[in-house]
Amino acid sequence: MASDKTKGNLPHILVVDDEAAIQRFLRTVLDAEEFTVHQAETGHAALAAAAVIKPDVILLDLGLPDLDGVEVIRRIREWSPVPIIVLSVREREDEKVQALDAGADDYLTKPFGIAELLARIRASLRRTLQQVPEPVFTLGGLVVDLPRRLVSVDGAEVQLTPTEYDLLRLLVTHAGKVLTHGQILRQLWGNAYLEQPHVLRVNISNLRRKIEADPSRPRFIITEPGVGYRLQTPR
């Protein structure tokens, strides 16, 4: 059963990896954080477990012995919005993009830091609990009032162009999730702009100049090199 936070049940995490050492390591870490851990070693076992357990988050390795992890993501996405965080040794940008475009919510390359993994899990759980975006998103000094279309930083209103606002709103509604260049371009400009990533880069740069204290070291909009962008979530 999926966890019910209002009743105090522990979040259920499904770990999908065929390496016994990784399974043991993640179980130790997640047990210590008081998650309920379930494990699967193959793609087919993962699909069955996801349907029966209905986990709150899935941690998925791509290199499974029977099904490629990207195929597992596609099949799960046919019926479930459960957050999927990929944990993989695959470092090529096109492989990361393929997994994210298939429906993964996040991607960490092995070896990864435990603190970062736990932060990504917490962000995924927050998105699941929210169901719909909060009317007012607050992160540090950044405040985005979605109903009123108002943006402020440290109490001062920020004037955005319609395109910059739409870009920020898209990032806010998927806060904590990596959005690929293709996903953002398709959503905001349409398929005709998929081969024009410079349009996105220019708008991200302009947006950062308006909301970041130091655009060269952004606190809010994080670049996932070669993949896309992610808006930080409140800690």
Image (spheres, rainbow, N blue to C red):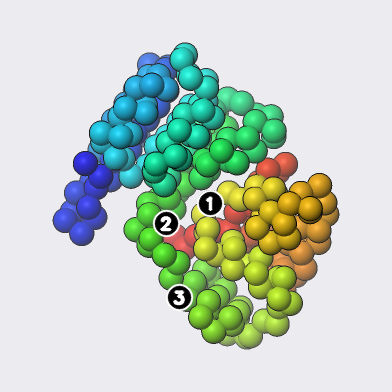
Q: Residues within 10 Å of mark 2 (few under 14, many from 20)?
A: some
Marks 2,1: beta carbons within 8 A: yes
Per the image, the residue denoted by label 1 is 177
Distance in Å between CA atoms under marks 3 and 1:
18 Å
Which residue is at 53% across, 76% downward? 146
> Which disc number belongs to residue 127?
2
| Quadrant occupied by the C terminus | bottom left
Q: Earlier in the sequence, mark 2 or mark 1?
A: 2
Tell me which amino acid carries mark 2. Arg
Marks 2,3: beta carbons within 8 A: no
Distance in Å between CA atoms under marks 2 and 3:
14 Å
Q: Quadrant of residue 25?
A: top left
Q: Is residue 195 above or below residue 20?
A: below
Tell me which amino acid carries mark 1. Lys
Tell me which amino acid carries mark 3. Pro
Comparing 72 with 154, the one in front is 72
Distance in Å between CA atoms under marks 2 and 1:
9 Å
Residue 48: image location, x then y, percent: 32, 27
